[in-house]
Every structure is written in C-alpha cells, then in structure tokens.
Image (tube, grey):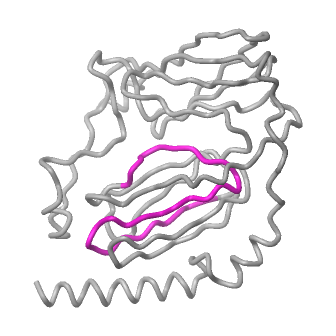
Amino acid sequence: MRLRSVWMFGLGVALAASVSACGGSQNTPAAEKEAAAAPAAATSTSPVDPATAADVKGTVTVSGTVPANVAIKMNADPVCARQADGPQMMETYVVGTDGKSLANVFVYVKDGLGNLVFETPTTPVRIDQKDCRYHPHVFGIQVGQPLDIINSDPTLHNIHAVAKNNREFNNGQPIQNMKTTHTFTAGEVMVPFKCDVHGWMNAYVGVMTNPFYAVSDTSGAFSLKGLPPGTYTIEAWHEKLGTLTQSVTVGAKESKDITFAFTVPAASAN
C-alpha cells in the first residue's frame, strides 16, 4: 500500500506538472491572456419585464428498449473500491420508476432571444469528484460564471474538458479538497468532461449565454422560468439519444407545457 501511495503521489505530481506545461491550469500566462481577451461580463439587470414573464415547462420521456447501464469496475483504484457503496453503474440512461421518464436531459432555449443581454452570475457552479464519480453528471453554466472544480476524494483525479468553442483544459488534482476555478468564454452545448485516471468518470456541461436552461429530474420534469413573451426554439439534449427540438410561442404571463419524447433505436438495445 505504501508503494502504491508513493506511486500515486508521483503520478499526481507528474500529471499536475504536465497539465501546467500544457496550459491546463488557469494560473498560466496563456489563461490570463484569454481571460483578458474575453468580453466583459454584462452588468445590467435582467432585460425581462417580470410583469410579463412567461414559463415553459414539461417532461422528457423515453420509449423503446432502454439499454442497461454498464457496470463500473473500480478495483483498479483501491481508494475508489473502498468508497463505493455497493455496485456502481454508469449514468448513461437514468429512467424513472414509471419506466418512461428520462433524467439528465439538458433542456435549453436555443433560439428566439434575439440580442438580449443577460447579467453574468457571480455565484460559482460546483462540480465535485466524490466517491470516484463526477457530481453532477449533467449541468449548466453561463459564459463567464465561475466553475469550482473540487476533489473530495483522497486519491488522484483530473478533470479534462474536451471543448470545441472554448479552450480545452486538463487540471490534475492529486490532493484531497483541492479546488480549481475555471470560466468558459463562449457558448457551447455540450462540453464533455472525463477523468484520464478513472476511465468511467464522465460528465457534461451546457455553457449558455442566457439563463434559460434546466436538467430533467428522475420524473422527467424540467422548467424554464421568466422568459419574455415570444417564439422560441427549445432543444433537449441527451448524451446517447441526441437532440429533439420544438418551436414554442408564449404570451405575456403564459405558462406552456411541452413534452420531449425520445425513442431508443432498435439497434441500441442490442
């Protein structure tokens, strides 16, 4: 065990050094230049009149034969194996007890807000590496909003964001309770996260230029509140089932219900 601890610490130091050398840490000069070049956060209050604000809410469902989630084998890292509370499964398909409600679907306003500019939140969003899993698995954040990346485990983790519109980053965290803060500079749906140490760890973040997004819960429910009256393209994203879109028109103070119905292709069930 002592030899493994020494090995893991050495790997952690090497990974952290490698990440720093590749510009993965936010404290690098390249990151500072990027932050300086990023557009200033909007300081105005919300452009939506609360007296006329509308809501779009609804449910996400799935039909067909939903594949079983893959079992996770954590024995490669004894720390992970000790912390696991029973058998661990991937979170690819999270279906409610009714057998049709689908969780972990990112629902957002894709189009229809025109040139409205929304204030950038200063409260950080948090993603935690705990029990050798990312928490949460799917979430949203706004451009410029701080993202706190935490390692709550007494083992080496890293968070590798494979972005396209934003800068790719790879932060090693070899010490328990380490925290790194990152901000995204461009909208992007979705940015995958992975851990290069523990291959089963993955998560997804939707980076938004507006506050109208939600993640469906285990009952499939989601809610987009406080929209200005108008016509919108609403999109629902799932990591394996792709995307569905709907056009929705809401009037002043109107609340409209919609349903996104995903179908598992027959080939996916095999």
Q: Which is nearer the eye, 90 or 118?
A: 118
Furthest residue in direction right, as rendered:
115
Residue occupying image coordinates x 36% and y 83%: 12
Image height of 5 relative to 111, above or below:
below
Q: Quick check: is 158 in the magenta stretch? A: yes
Image height of 209 relative to 246, above or below:
below
Asked whether, in this view, residue 241 is left or right of residue 197, the answer is: right
Asked whether, in this view, residue 36 is left or right of residue 66, the answer is: right
Q: Quadrant of residue 264?
A: top left
Q: Which residues are magenta?
A: 134-163
Image height of 100 relative to 127, above or below:
above
How many numbered marks appear? 0
Residue occupying image coordinates x 39% and y 51%: 135
Asked whether, in this view, residue 187 is left or right of residue 47, the answer is: left
Asked whether, in this view, residue 98 is left or right of residue 221, the answer is: left
Residue occupying image coordinates x 33% and y 62%: 199
Q: Which is nearer the eye, 154 or 161?
A: 154
Q: State which quarter of the image contains the N terminus.
A: bottom left
Report x, y in % for residue 26.
61, 75
Q: Quadrant of residue 30?
A: bottom right
Report x, y in % for residue 159.
45, 66
Residue occupying image coordinates x 51% and y 81%: 19
Q: Quick check: is 162 in the magenta stretch? A: yes
Image height of 40 relative to 240, above or below:
below
Report x, y in % for residue 270.
29, 32
